Amino acid sequence: MSALLEVHNVSRKFGALMAVNNVSFSVGQGELLGLIGPNGAGKSTLYNLIAGVLPPTVGEIVFNGQKVTGWKPYDVARVGIGRTFQIPKPYRQLSVVENVMLTAFLREKSTAGARKLAEATLADVGLADYFGTPVNALTVGLLKRLEVARALAMQPKLVLFDEIMAGLTPTEVGVMTKFVAGLPERGITVVWVEHVLYAIMKTATRMIVLNRGELIAEGLPVALARDPAVVKAYLGEEMDFA
Amino acid sequence: MSVAETQTFAKIRRFPILPERGKVSLFEILLLVVCVALVAARLPPSMGDVLLLTFLFAGLGLAWNIAGGYAGLISFGHAAFFGVGAYTSTILFVHFNVTPWLGIWCGALLAGIFGAVLALVCARLRGPFFILSTLAFAEVVRIGALNWSSLTGGPEGLSIPPTASLINMVFTSKTTYAALMLGYVVVVYAISKALEASRYGYYLLAIRDNEDAASAAGVNPLQGRVAAMALSASLTGIGGSLFAQYFLYLDPTFVISPEISFQFALLPAVGGLGTAIGPVLGSLLITPLSELLRSNLGNAAAGLHLVIYSAGLIVVMLYFPGGLAGAIAKLKRWRPFS
C-alpha cells in the first residue's frame, strides 16, 4: 500500500499553545484511518492544517506525491481532498441539491452534469427525497448527511470526515457506519475523526490517537482500547484507593 | 383539440409560467413584448422620458445585482463606475472626437478595472465595513473628477454638443433612446440569466452564503469577488455612457452622487436581491413612481414626493422581504383549492 497522505513532523502554535505538536503519520491508499482523542486534543486543528485552512508553523504535508504544505483550501480541494465540517456549513439560501452541486462542479463543469452527479451522491447517502428542500428545513442528522454528500460529490481521492455521527440516532449511526466502511472499495481513502467510538472502532482499519497536540498511540482498534496511554488520556489516572 | 393545437400547447408548456433559474419563462417573454410595444407606441415626450429612464435604471439595477445580489457585495459606491463610464466616453468624444459607439467600450473597460481594484483593496472587509468603504471609494472618485478640471471640466461640468446623428449617438426622438435603453436592459438581463444558470453564478452564491464551505469546494473566494465586481462595474459603466448620451451634460456632484448609488441598490432590494427579474420589477415600480411623483408634486408641495416615495418603500420592505420576485415565488407555491 503506497502512502496517499504523509504528514511529517507537523506543528501548529497558537501563541504559547502547541495545538499540534510534532505529529507524523501517513495514510495508505484505500485505508480507513480513525483519528480519535479527547476534546481539545488538536484533531480539528490537524484537519485544518491538512485542508489548508491554516498553515503549519513547521512541518510538511505531502499528498499523492505532491507537497501541499501551506496551500490554500481551494487548491487542496482541487487536487482531491474533500472534507466535512464539524459544525455543518451549508449554503443557507440554496436548496439541498444545489449545495451538493457546488462541490460536484469540481468534476462536472456543466450545470446539468453537476446536478446529475449531485443527485446520485445524495441518493447514495439517503437524501433522495430532499433534492429541492431548502437547507433550513433539515434536521441535524440530515445536515450531517448533506455534509458527507458535499464532500463526496467532488469525487475526492481522500476525504476528511469530522464527527459525522454526532446528533444521529442509533439507527442512523448504523446505516452511516456501513456506508463509510464501503468507501475505500470505491477508491476513496478515508480519515475519520469521531466521538461515537463504537462506530469507528468497528470500521477503521487502523487508528491514531491524539492528546494535547501529540500523537500518543497508533495501531489496530482492538489493541488501542487496551493501551494504557489511551485509557489515561480518556479516563485519567487509575486511582489507588488502598 | 387538434394535433397541431396539442403540439403548440406542448411547446408552450416547455416554458414555465413564472421566472425560474436557468429557464426562459412566459412571464419574461410577455414582459419583453410589453416593453417593445411601449417603445413602438411612441409615447408623448414626457412619458418617453419616464420610459427610457425606467429601462436605463432596470439595466443599472441588474448590473448592481451581479455584485450586490449574487455575490453579496453590497455596494453604495456604484455611482463611481457609472461616472467612470459616463466620463470616459464623453471625454473621448468631446476632447478626442472618438465616437461614443467606441467610447462606451473604453468606459466599460475602465469601470471594470476600477471595480476590480475596489474588490482587491476591500478584500478583507465584510458587511458594514465593506459597504462604508464603497461609499468612501465613490467619494474619492467624485472629488477626483471635481478637481481634474482640464479633463472633466470640474464643477462646471462637461457638455456633449447636441448635434443629432447616429455616429454621435445623439438623437432627437425619445423613442430612439428608449429603444437603445431597452437594448441595454435585454443585454444585461441575458448576462444575468446566463450567469445564474452557470457554474460561475453558483460560485458567487456559495461565496456569499458560506466562504469556508466554498473554499473547501475548490472555489477561490477572492477571485470570485473580484470577477463579480469587475463585471458589475463594467456593465454599470456602459449604463453611465448611455446616460451621458441622453442627458448630454455631466457634472461630478450629480453623476457620482450617493443618491445615484443608493438608487442602484434600492431597485434590486425592492424587486428581489439575487434574482434576474428582481431589479427589472424594482425599476418598473420605483422609477415611474419617483418620476411621476416628482413632476406632479414637486412644485406644489416641495419634498412631499419623497415622503410618499419613502412610505411606499417601507411598506414593500416590511411586507415583501424577498422583494417583488419573492412575492411572485410565493404566488407560485400558493394553492388556493387544496
Image (tube, coloured by chain):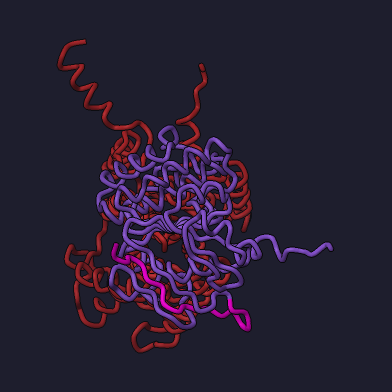
What residue appears at the point 44 percent right and 67 percent down from the top-left corner?
B78
On whether residue B243 falls in the magenta region, the answer is no
Judge whether A75 appears above or below A60 on screen: above
B307 up-or-down from B333: above or below: below
Q: What percent of the width, then of the height, locates residue B285?
A: 47, 45
Locate residue A61, reporting x and y percent. Answer: 39, 74
Q: Nearer the viewer, residue B207 or A158?
A: A158
* Chain drawn red in the picture: B
Report whether B248 appears left or right of A172.
left
Q: What is the chief secondary structure element of the magenta stretch? A: strand
Q: Would you say residue B106 is visible in this rendering?
A: yes
Identify the residue at horizontal 50%, vertical 50% (top origin).
A200
Q: Position of residue A180 (x, y in %)?
A: 42, 47
Seen from the viewer's position, the closer of residues B54 and A70 is A70
Q: Is residue A22 above or below residue B257?
A: below
Q: Which residues are magenta?
A: A1-18
User: Does any portion of residue B84 appear in the rendered image?
Assistant: no
The residue closer to the viewer here, B331 or A168, is A168
Which quarter shows the C terminus of chain A? bottom right
Where residue B39 appears, as percent x and y from the top left, is 29, 45
B40 left or right, relative to A95: left
Toward the front, the furthest residue is A242
Instruction: From the viewer's perspective, tell me whether residue A130 is left or right of residue B159.
Output: right
Give the residue furthest to the top: B1
Which chain corresponds to the colour purple?
A
Pick the front one: A233 or B102:
A233
